[in-house]
Amino acid sequence: MKSNITLIGMPASGKSTVGVLLAKRLGYSFVDVDIVIQEKTGKLLKEIIAEVGTEGFLDVEEQINSELDVKRSIIAPGGSVIYGEKAMEHLKEISTVVYLKLEYRDVKRRLGDLTDRGVALKNGMTLRDLYEERVPIYEKYADITIDETGKTPGQTVDELRAVMEARIRDGLQAK
């Protein structure tokens, strides 16, 4: 069984909120990759995007995600991590990947200022375009999908814990 859990999903899907709660419940560390990027570069995400553009930011994000070396951690990368194949292969190797699925209307309601959040939007792209582009990629990489519609972060954590415990039980019984 892989000792880490990586949470993927749209910005505002609750990766950080759910991740912190889950880490506390499991006694794991919590790794917010956006903060790791800011620490390693000495810049805010929006500053990196302003300096090197969306593509340059995606390169930085992929590099840092593909070098993560953690154990017994909940990993919360940025929503755009899925564009980096090397990063996603590494995360799938070291962790169980969980897609926190959120309806478009809920993403829009939760998000607020996209630029301030450091969301990697390509020129001319709307939030709806981004959502439609990313959902199939999140689904492709997910080992587990948790639908958050109508759930509090606590309920999402409870459901995810139950699914993980069942996987562990089934894995042990299979041996």
Image: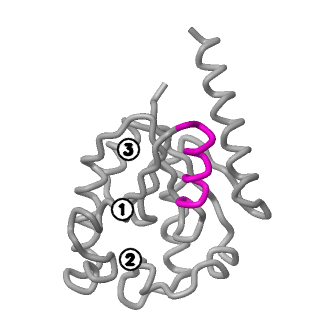
Q: Nearer the viewer, residue 152 or 130?
A: 152
- The 10 Å Cα crowd at callout 1, few under 14, some 14 to 19, many 20 or more, is some
Give the amino acid at mark 1. Tyr
Label 1 belongs to which residue? 83
Residue at x-position 42% and y-position 64%? 78
Is label 1 or label 3 in front?
A: 3
Residue at x-position 77% and y-position 60%? 151
- Picture disc at residue 94: none
Provide the residue span drawn in magenta: 15-27
Instruction: Provide the major secondary structure of the magenta segment.
Output: helix
For the C terminus, give its image quadrant: top right
- The 10 Å Cα crowd at callout 3, few under 14, some 14 to 19, many 20 or more, is many
Residues under numbered marks 1 and 3 in contact, where contact means CB atoms less than 8 Å apart: no
Label 2 belongs to which residue? 120
Label 3 belongs to which residue? 91
* Tag 1 secondary structure: helix
Q: Earlier in the sequence, mark 2 or mark 1?
A: 1
